[in-house]
Image (cartoon, rainbow, N blue to C red):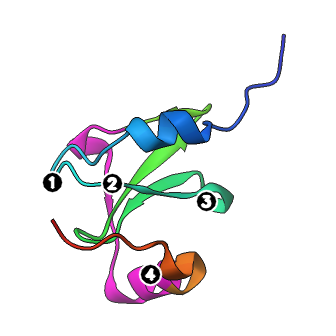
Amino acid sequence: MPQPTEPGPQLLSLLACPVDKGPLIHVPEEDLLYNPRLRRGYPIRDNLPYLRPLDALTLDDTRHQELLSRIGGRVSPSS
């Protein structure tokens, strides 16, 4: 059976947060799609993004700042 691959840039560019409809930032080392505007992370499991609001992780201030420092200038402006 072939190994699953990471979601490609084309797929990632089509995905949006189900709550605010804004862009998501891929954090590959954590298998996460992150919305810094709402501080919500959506997991990627078996290379499938789980974008239901019930699947979202709400990040606290410390975790949010850690991710912002890791992703640097890739933060999108608020909608």
| Image location (x, y in percent) of residue 27 | 57, 60
Residue at image point 30% right, 45% down = 16
Helix, strand or loop for the magenta stretch, by majority? helix
Pointer 3 with pointer 2, Cβ within 8 A: no
> Where is mark 3, residue-wise?
30
> SS of the residue at dot 1?
loop
Instruction: Say above or below: 54 vs 78.
Output: above
Residue 43 vs residue 52: left or right?
Answer: right
Which of labels 3 and 1 is toward the front?
1
**Alpha carbon separation for disc pair 3 and 2:** 18 Å
> SS of the residue at dot 3?
helix
> Where is mark 1, residue-wise?
20
| Image location (x, y in percent) of residue 19 | 16, 49
Q: Amino acid at mark 3?
A: Glu
What residue range appears in magenta?
51-68
Q: Amino acid at mark 4?
A: Arg
Is residue 45 or residue 23 the one in the foreground?
A: 23
| Image location (x, y in percent) of residue 67 | 50, 77
Within 10 Å of disc 3 (Cα), the crowding (few <14, some 14-19, many 20+) is few
Within 10 Å of disc 1 (Cα), the crowding (few <14, some 14-19, many 20+) is few
**Alpha carbon separation for disc pair 3 and 4:** 12 Å
Q: Which mark is residue 23?
A: 2
Q: Amino acid at mark 1?
A: Asp
Instruction: Say above or below: 19 vs 46.
Output: below
Give the mark nearest the N terminus, 3 or 2. Answer: 2
> SS of the residue at dot 2?
loop
